[in-house]
Every structure is written in structure tokens, then in C-alpha cells.
Image (cartoon, rainbow, N blue to C red):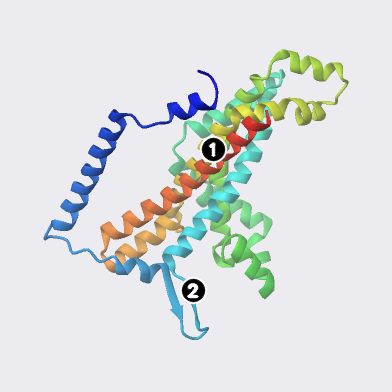
């Protein structure tokens, strides 16, 4: 049978599904019981609350503490890196589909270098060499320090505090260049998936090269690249943990600081893992919602 009844029937749990879920629940319960029944480690989850929020007696209200601030920094870092990586992937992906040899050589060199170099090496390379040189030439640090109080507050909200902003910017650019190489290949594959007839129709309508991509090619390629693009954005969230090595106060770095101060190893890392899971699963949920909406509008 074809229709909504068939789809609802396919979604029902079978006896095998119920048995597997029961075994999984028992395994999780046994694991938690083993963790809490050990005598060598005393659990203390109250420390998590203290480092998530704190009460500011002077202001008379609650404020974000180091772990929550680290989570917000991770969100800002991932958001700006994702936007910049998308722009890089879009431009380089379009260039990669051009017939000119020089265009393909440039994009292929960039993709192969970024994909075959460990991200940790790129972080150190850009932060200790390229980042310092570019920031010094542009006079960015002096310009940031000359900002007024309102501009500094805005910069802190959308990015990082003024003294941390050069390192934050280096981390954003490094992550964007690394992830942009993968997005370049995703965009290129999406553009090449558009049938030749669509290209010929765009030519026949007399559209300019920009309008051909804007109105004909990219809207169709978007449906193909959306799942892989969301998956890459989730990778940006997870890969952002690597910038802790250059003292960016994101979630992993703050977790290391709290663990060193409290020696609450398991509580800290379980909490951090759950926070990363919430961020990543939220992106997956948004992607599924977009896919359903696009399928309805198709």
C-alpha cells in the first residue's frame, strides 16, 4: 500500500526493536550503577551548578560562570567559522566547476592542502605565524583597544573580549579554512549534480553567469548539499574544541580549567560531552526540519 498509512506502518516498533531498546536500557542502567557503586570515586554534581552560573551580589542577579561562558564562546566560534567556511566553500566550489585550468589548480591545491594537513598543525601555523603577521600589519590590536565602551561591549557579545579578540579571530579563520575545504567539495558535487538540461535552459534564457547560478543552478544544488553541509557544520562545532591549545576560552578549555581546580574529572567531562551533544543534535534537528519543508514545497 502506498500513502500515509504505509509510512505510519513502517514507523511502528517491532518486537525486535523493543527487545533491543530493552537491552540498551539495561546496559545503560548497569553502567550507571557500576559508576556510582564504586568506592574509589565520590561523585559531586553540585560543582557543575556552581561553575555554570554564579550569583553577583553587587548586581543582585545571576550571571553566567566559566562553563556557561565557554559554551557561549563555542557557539559564537562555531557560528562565525561556519558562516565564513560556507562563503569559502561556495566561492571555491563554484570556481572548481569552471573549465579553466588555473581555476581548477587553485581550488585543488587549497582542498588537498587543507584536507591532508592535521587541524592542530593549521591552528599553530596560523596563530603563531600568519595570524601574528597579518594582525600586526593591519594594526588590528591597536584599533580594538581604541574602541569606546559601547563598541567593546558589542565586540564582546558577538565575538570575544577585546584582549582575546585577535586569538579568537585567528581561531575563526583557521577553522573556516579547514572546514571550507570540505564544503568546497560538497558544493562542487552539488553543482555537478544539476543536469545538463538545466544549464542549457539557463543559457537559452539569456541569463548572465551570476543569474544562472543564482536562479537556476544553486537552488537545485542546495537540495543536494543540505544534509552534507549540516553534517559539516556539526563537525565545526566538534572541531572547535581543538582551539583550546591556543587558550581560546571555549567549552573544552574552560572544562580543563574547572577540572584542574576541582579534580571533578567525570562530572566535568560528562557535562561537556552532553553540552556538545545538545549543540550537535540541535543542528541535526534543524536540518531535518528544513529537509521536510523542502520536500513539502517540492
**Label drawn at residue 8:** none
Marks 2 & 1, CB-CB < 8 Å contact:
no
The crowding category of the residue bearing disc 1, from other C-alpha atoms within 10 Å (few below 14, some 14 to 19, many at least 20), is: some
Q: How far apart are marks 2 and 1 (CA)?
A: 34 Å
Residue 84 drawn above or below residue 210: below
- Residue nearest the observer in this picture, 250 or 8: 8
Report the residue at 76% width, 17% height from top.
Answer: 199
Task: Place residue 259 in its image quadrant.
Answer: bottom left
Taking the image as shown, residue 64 lies to the left or right of residue 20, namely right
Identify residue for label 1. Answer: 288
Taking the image as shown, residue 221 lies to the left or right of residue 174, namely right
Q: Is mark 1 on a helix, strand or loop?
A: helix
Q: Where is residue 241 in the image (x, y as percent from the top left)?
A: 43, 50
Identify residue for label 2. Answer: 63
Eye-nearest disc, 2 or 1: 1
Q: Where is residue 206 in the image (x, y as percent from the top left)?
A: 88, 21
Amino acid at each position: 500500500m502506498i500513502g500515509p498509512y504505509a509510512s505510519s506502518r513502517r514507523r511502528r516498533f517491532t518486537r525486535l526493536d523493543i527487545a533491543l531498546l530493552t537491552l540498551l536500557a539495561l546496559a545503560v542502567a548497569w553502567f550507571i550503577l557500576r559508576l556510582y557503586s564504586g568506592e574509589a570515586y565520590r561523585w559531586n554534581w553540585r560543582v557543575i551548578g556552581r561553575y555554570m552560573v554564579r550569583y553577583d551580589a553587587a548586581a543582585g542577579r545571576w550571571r553566567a560562570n566559566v562553563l556557561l561562558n565557554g559554551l557561549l564562546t563555542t557557539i559564537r566560534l562555531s557560528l562565525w567559522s561556519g558562516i565564513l567556511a560556507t562563503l569559502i566553500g561556495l566561492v571555491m566550489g563554484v570556481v572548481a566547476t569552471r573549465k579553466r585550468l588555473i581555476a581548477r589548480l587553485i581550488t585543488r591545491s587549497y582542498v588537498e592542502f587543507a584536507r591532508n594537513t592535521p587541524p592542530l598543525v593549521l591552528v599553530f601555523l596560523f596563530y603563531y605565524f600568519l595570524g601574528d603577521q597579518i594582525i600586526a600589519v593591519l594594526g588590528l590590536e591597536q584599533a580594538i583597544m581604541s574602541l569606546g565602551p559601547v563598541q567593546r561591549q558589542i565586540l564582546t557579545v558577538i565575538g570575544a573580549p577585546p584582549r582575546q579578540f585577535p586569538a579568537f579571530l585567528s581561531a575563526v579563520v583557521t577553522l573556516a579554512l579547514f572546514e571550507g575545504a570540505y564544503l568546497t567539495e560538497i558544493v562542487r558535487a552539488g553543482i555537478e549534480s544539476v543536469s545538463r538540461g538545466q544549464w542549457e535552459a539557463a543559457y537559452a534564457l539569456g541569463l548572465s553567469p551570476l543569474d544562472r547560478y543564482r536562479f537556476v543552478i544553486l537552488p537545485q544544488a542546495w537540495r543536494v548539499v543540505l544534509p552534507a553541509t549540516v553534517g559539516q557544520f556539526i563537525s565545526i562545532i566538534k572541531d572547535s574544541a581543538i582551539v583550546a591549545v591556543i587558550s581560546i576560552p571555549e567549552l573544552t578549555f574552560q572544562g580543563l580549567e574547572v577540572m584542574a581546580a576541582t579534580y571533578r574529572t567525570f562530572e566535568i567531562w560528562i557535562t561537556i560531552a552532553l553540552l556538545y551533544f545538545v549543540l550537535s543534535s540541535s543542528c541535526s534537528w534543524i536540518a531535518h526540519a528544513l529537509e521536510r519543508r523542502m520536500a513539502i514545497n517540492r
